Amino acid sequence: MSQDTITIAIDAMGGDDAPHSEVAGAVEAIRETKDIHITLVGKSDVIEPELKKCKYDKERISVHHCSEVIEMHESPTEALKKKPDSSIIVGLKLQRQKKADAFISAGNTGAVMAASLLTLGRIANVTRPTIGESFPTDKGISILFDVGASVDNKPIHLLEFAVMGVEYAKHIFNVENPRVAVLSIGEEESKGNTLSTEAYQLLKQSNLNFIGNVEGRDILRGKAEVIVCDGFTGNVVLKFAESVIPVLKSRFRQHASQNIFKKIWVGMMYGTLKKILKDFDYQEHGGVPLLGVNGISLIGHGSSSPKAIKIMALRAEHMAREKINDIIQERIKDIKQILPKTD
């Protein structure tokens, strides 16, 4: 392998369709880029039969056996204590031991977040890691931080989310000078709760490209590339957004079933509708990054397809090559200078 090869550890036991989607996604990923190696972490007696069904370069995919699996329904804290040889913990340990450059999983979200923090630790000066979800807009992309890494946040956390989000938008999405906004109930500076109004003041004093408050309807309008809020609010927005496409598809099917003319109309519109809705499909975006941990950890939806796994692997490679954590560590140092001075 090349010295520039990036190794991605994939939790092969995590998703609803594991290990099929993980194996197929790994095979697709190494076909897409030449300088990537994938380590599939999980029960080898389950993974290897899936690999045998595929044609791939055997030098570029390996299997790292572990004996335990953290199930979706398990309590993250209990599972991490009881299952130290799980695919999530073992995969993250490979990264800590420098045997992998990144880790991705479509498994138990809470377990991945907790294990990432415990195993990799935090980047210096980061007090709270964050998960960001990207949304397509008329003007490009908006990324919302936080969407569930923690439900209770302080103003300083939102400032950190903004700093990390800006660097992520710059280096992963090539946004030259990302606009930053606070998600609130009105555009006026005074609108919002204590958290949002105090975060507004911190961001106002920062050297970020802060444009003020935006409302929920502004996320898809592209008013800002980086939008910050507490994890409770962000997760509600995310889950609502994920429900829209399935409902629209169901409504189109219902409309088509009413009579032959409506069925023909929907059929004629199908190609256009599919293209429009594609941008909103989470499978097209892979997974969400957990920023602030001292490593690269991406979390996918439980129902991630092979395509979603592939996209996650390629995103992880991109983050590793851009050395995103080194950049965040340097930028986050500025936070103490941004904070208001106290007597």
Image (cartoon, helix red, strand yellow):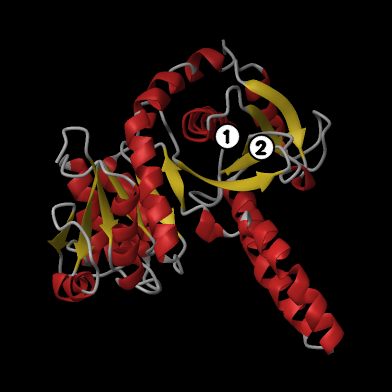
Discs 1/2, front: 1
Measured along the vertical axis of the image, is residue 271 above or below residue 10? below
Amino acid beneath label 1: Leu
Q: Can residue 341 be seen by looking at this rendering?
A: yes
Label 2 element class: helix
Q: Quadrant of the N terminus?
A: top left
The residue under the point 39% across, 62% down is 106
Closer to the camera in the image, 146 or 56: 56
**Real-space Cα separation, disc 1 to disc 2, in angstroms:** 9 Å
The residue under the point 23% across, 66% down is 55
Measured along the vertical axis of the image, is residue 220 above or below residue 162? below
Closer to the camera in the image, 84 or 134: 134
The mark nearer the N terminus, 1 or 2, is 1
Q: Can residue 255 be seen by looking at this rendering?
A: no
Label 1 element class: helix
On residue 195, the disc is 2
For label 2, the crowd category at 10 Å Cα-Cα, with few meaning under 14, some 14 to 19 and many 20 or more, is some
Residue pointed to by mark 1:
158
Measured along the vertical axis of the image, is residue 252 above or below residue 82? below
x and y percentages locating residue 239 in the rendered image = 62, 61
On residue 273, the disc is none
Measured along the vertical axis of the image, is residue 327 above or below residue 305? above
x and y percentages locating residue 282 in the rendered image = 55, 58
Closer to the camera in the image, 206 or 65: 65
In this picture, residue 44 sits left or right of residue 147: left
Pointer 1 with pointer 2, Cβ within 8 A: yes
